[in-house]
Image (cartoon, coloured by chain):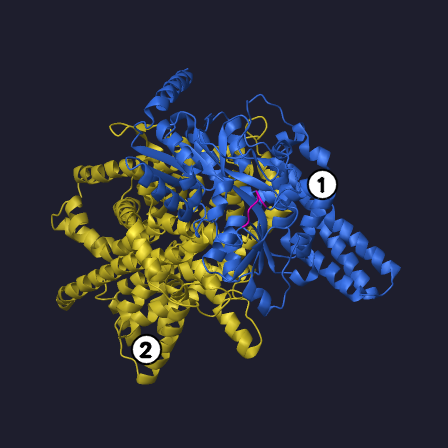
Chain colours: A blue, B yellow
Amino acid sequence: MTNRKTTFWTIVFGLALAVLAAPLGAVALEKKLVIVTSYPPDTTTTVKKAFEKKHPGVKVEMLKKKTTAGIKYLQETASNNRSDMFWASAPDAFEVLKGDNLLQKYKVKIKGIPKNVGAFPINDPEGYYKGFAASGYGIMWNTRYLKAKKLPAPKTWADLAMPVYHGHVGMSAPSRSGTTHLTVETLLQGKGWEKGWAEWKAIAGNFKTVTERSFGVPDGVNSGQFGLGIVIDFFGLSSEASGFPVKFIYPPVTTLVPANIAIVKNAPHPKAAAAFIEFLLSPAGQEVLLDKKIRRLPVNPATYAKAPKDFPNPFKDKSIGSAVKFDLQLSKNRYNVINSLFDVMVTYRLNDLRAATKAIQTAEAQMGGKKNMAAKKLIDEAKALVAKVPITAAQASKKEFNAIFKKKRKKATTKVTGRQAEVEREWDAQVKANYAKARALAEKAASML
Amino acid sequence: MSLEAMARGQWGPAAVGLIVGLFLLAFLVVPVVNVIYVAFQDPNTGALTLINFVDFFRNNLFQESAINSIYVALMSVVLASCFALPLAYFTTRFNFGGAILIQTLGVLPLIMPPFVGAVAMLLLLGENGSVNLLLDEWFGFKVPFMEGLNGVILVESIHYFPFILMNLSASLNNIDRSMEESAQNLGASGMRLFRRIVFPLAMPGYVAGASLVFLKVFDDIGTPLLLNINNMLAPQAYLRIASIGISDPMGYVISVILVIFSLLALWTSFLALRNKDYATVQKGGGGLMKRDLRPWEKAACYGVVVFILLLVLSPHFGLAILSLGTVWSFSVLPDAYTYAHYLRVISDSSEFITNTLLYAGLAAGIDVVFGTAIAYIVLRTGLAGRQWLDYAAMGAVAIPGVVLGIGYLRTFYAFNVPIIDKPLASWWVIIVVALAIRRLPYALRACMAALQQLSVMLEEAAENLGATKGRTIYRVVVPLMSGGIVAGFITSFATAAVELSTTIMLVSQESDAPLAFGIYEFMQSAAGRGPGAALGIIAVVIVGVATYVSHRFIQRKETRQTPDMAIVAGV
């Protein structure tokens, strides 16, 4: 009841404000602004300093949380909200908050931001969250590492599945990092369910490790723990700008998605929050994104004029991020299932997967140009076993099936059959057996050559 | 003693016990029960059930995780003992130059957040770290120090061995010299003296330290995760909660299992010490009789000490180099050196440092007061339910930090603190409370060990001479326990200063954040690795200085006490 009342007054107040703001130009802002963000201090302090310079009266508090933890924090604290804004990369995180009715609509006043970047709309069509930068996913590598190990530089996702890269690739898990989730989903949408998973597992067979945080990947590449990593662009670009001997490229099948900002419902400082969005989208704010510690793609095409040489420009270079039309609804429908599948098949069974992949690669290397139909058949069988996914695409998007993986029961009476742990146990048993069998088949094939 | 005096004597401890009990109930039991309850809920219907445990035991991955966790914890205790025993024995047994310095350096590994230690260890000892790059270049082979579970065992034992070192040293220092003299008079010497007299007498300290190491390793989350090891119990619990959501029951089931295992370990350590009387009537003047070493013995001992110190301090060397280096990538050492990281940290982040000193200091203060109180109540009074205080306080060691954090958010968010009008869960004081709860077991173990070694006859003597219970505690018990109390304070303070897993859940605004949180934030970006390392070094220096000062304090106290003791003994 009180909640609704406050919302009502916020809206009335907001409207009154909007009317007043037009003639007066500048409005007195609140003295404080609390932003929940997943960004590192390199981004937050730089933007904060620039904003506070523009609006000297406002003190910005950055509250750093991992994206998933940030969502949880806003959910747990909604009854007594103290946060003004949520500022993070993954659009799906904002979808979750929107679905829980935790965001506040806002209409941007700044002009000059296009509708789309790549194939993706920059702003939430319903007006709850705004894109302020674009991000794509790609491959980064350590040039010293590749040189020392005499490895070629990759160009596409499929390259990462080549035997030369065995044990040299790193990636985070989609369940742990919203940005990684998007990468996995993009390839699945771009290549289709079966082919997409087959490619992911072929790449994962070359993994050195699955890192716990998304930043673990650039960190590992920067320090040379592994040679190549699958990362979001600004990790690669800012590492390069910070002087590390690394390179970053966008493979053809990537998607550009906006990184977003939104005002939280019942924000204690709505005016300062609005000013922050306007600032971030203004030319001054967009330019801050080019800082060499940040290196994000601005959403205002005009800003690229000030970018360093060779800085990717998705508004000019149409090859970046336009190959896949990302289906946000599809991604949302199977979000938790994808997380769980990836963990069961890759993260927790990495050793088995790696062993099977190594066996297949060895057998194929021995095969070389030789003609041996029996061995070839065994190798193909082994490959199919590794690629096998416990469920079909249709099943993965099924509503009833997804309910098992839902984070929250809406009501105590909601009936769901099956438990996540039970489903995962069945998958795990299948996957483990498949990997073991694939390895045995490949070894048998190798012995025949 | 008259009944009246008895009643009067018990009244104070009962009140104190009640306060401590209520504190533990509100800030440990309730939040944890709030969370663990989920483990027994059917995820679909919300009804009470054991089905989640059935799922757990039938899952291959979880079985594997349990075995890995036990293996890693046991191996870490073994390796940590190898580090701690020589350091503790040499410095307490012999006249050894630099004993205080060695003791202080030996504590340093504790005061680095484990995730920072792992970063540095990877740079030095990882597959493409400095050591392996050199080995590969010179000899053409690499040593898998950090591969798989090896890495976890190495990092954990380096990080936690100070628990054994400190508790064992305190015990050795408390051994009655006359015991040793009697043994020598009866003809024992060398190894036999150590094996039959010295080590058994120091057993409470060793067992206290070793059980702490086992417990901490068993439920550490940060280290395995940073090394990307998922197949262990605690990381599985964290991953379930962090990635599936706080209403997924498996995370809680694993938490319950962790708690059960940890309690089992504690129980085993109780059994090991049961039915043995470790108390000595007189507190040894400076512990064992120190003897001089022959030159070649001295050289050998120094060799061992230096080797151990080099190894256990390698994370610090790595971190120091990282904090001064520009770019360090796939090379033995950084490309160039700079002070810039320190300048940036000092100008931007001094808040983190003051917050840390405040939080860790308050938390450690609470811990030693409660630790002493609980130790006294458990060992010296007949209060009903006194063992439960001990169990509850020790139980905190078995509660994963994330679970406590979530429990606090769930329990205290709806509760607004009067006057400041803020939810309790987002007030900085809750961070202090969480740290105090998380570190109470360390202080408690140290206080327990100290009191166990103190004969009750001394107190009876004081009371016979007319001192009240309160005066006896104040003038006799606490001063004689001071070694253990200070050890407890240091352990609590130093480890609270670097704790992350609970604080990361509870920090609600940056101006309230402590150092470990700041380091963690910095370490999340490419350009932030250097400044993060610089902040880490600053943390180490601050806590290191605090520890050194405390050691000096204990030493001075002991040398002051010794003459009095000698007179007493002489009379």
Q: Residue at x 70, y 49 (%)?
A: A199
Vertical comparison of B434 with B101: above or below: above
Position in image of residue A409 (x %, y %): 56, 27
Instruction: Residue type at mark 1: give it.
Output: Trp
Instruction: Residue type at mark 2: give it.
Output: Gly
Q: Residue at x 42, y 17 (%)?
A: A4
Query: What element does badge 2 sit on?
Result: loop
**Residue tagged by mark 2?**
B187
Q: In the picture, residue A63 is in which quadrant?
A: top left
**Considering the image in quadrants, where does the C terminus of chain A appear?**
bottom right
Measured in 3D between alpha carbons, the distance from the residue under mark 2 to the one under mark 1, in whole angstroms, is: 80 Å
Q: Inspect the magenta stretch and tell me whether residue B437 lies in it.
A: no
Give the crowd class for mark 2: few <14, some 14-19, many >=20 residues within 10 Å: few
Query: Is B291 or B258 nearer to us in this picture?
Result: B258
Vertical comparison of A223 with A86: above or below: below
**Residue tagged by mark 1?**
A193
Position in image of residue A13 (x %, y %): 37, 19
Whether residue A419 sits left or right of residue A62 in the image: it is right
Marks 2,1: beta carbons within 8 A: no
Whether residue B568 sits left or right of residue A223 in the image: it is left
- Whether residue B282 can be seen here: no
Q: Read off the chain for label 1.
A: A
Q: Dominant secondary structure of the magenta stretch?
A: loop
How many numbered marks does the figure carry?
2
Q: Which residues are magenta?
A: A312-316
